[in-house]
Amino acid sequence: MRLLDTETNNIVNSIGIYLTKDEAKQMLSFLQSLVDGTAGNHVHVNDDSYAHEITLAIYSNENLDQFDERSRKLISEDS
C-alpha cells in the first residue's frame, strides 16, 4: 500500500477517510472493477460536488510503466 498527498507531493503513512453510504458504495464498486480488471489500473472516487477526490490504483511489477514518474517513484521507494 502506498499513500500520496497529491497536493503536497508527500508520502503519507496514515489517513482517515470519511464517506457517505453512497460514496462507500461507489468506492466498493470501483474497487471491484479494479480487481476484475475492467477499469484499467486506476479510478477516481469523487464527492457530489467534485471538491474531494480519492484516486485508487492497482499496481504490480508488470504495470509500473503505465504510471507517471511520480507514482513509479512512490511505489518503488516507499516501503
Image: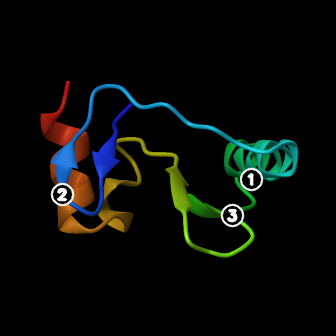
Q: Which residue is mark 3?
A: 47
Residue 79 vertical placement versus 75 (above, below): above
Q: Say which of marks 3 and 1 sits in front.
A: 3
Question: Horizontally, is 1 left or right of 56 in the view?
Answer: left
Q: Percent position (x, y) of residue 29?
A: 83, 49
Q: Secondary structure at mark 3?
A: loop
Q: Percent position (x, y) of residue 75?
A: 26, 42
Amino acid type for the residue under numbered disc 3 = Asp
Q: Percent position (x, y) of residue 12?
A: 26, 36
Residue 58 in view here: yes
Question: Horizontally, is 26 left or right of 79 in the view?
Answer: right
Residue 15 vertical placement versus 21 (above, below): above
Q: Secondary structure at mark 1?
A: helix
Residue 41 in view here: no
CA gap between label 1 and label 2 equals 24 Å
Q: Which residue is mark 1?
A: 30
CA gap between label 2 and label 3 equals 22 Å
Residue 75 vertical placement versus 7 (above, below): above
Residue nearest the observer in this picture, 69 or 29: 29
Residue 70 vertical placement versus 22 (above, below): below
Image marks 2 and 3: residues in contact by CB distance under 8 Å: no
Question: Horizontally, is 25 left or right of 34 in the view?
Answer: right
Residue nearest the observer in this picture, 7 or 58: 7
Amino acid type for the residue under numbered disc 1 = Phe
Q: Residue at x 18, y 40 (%)?
A: 76
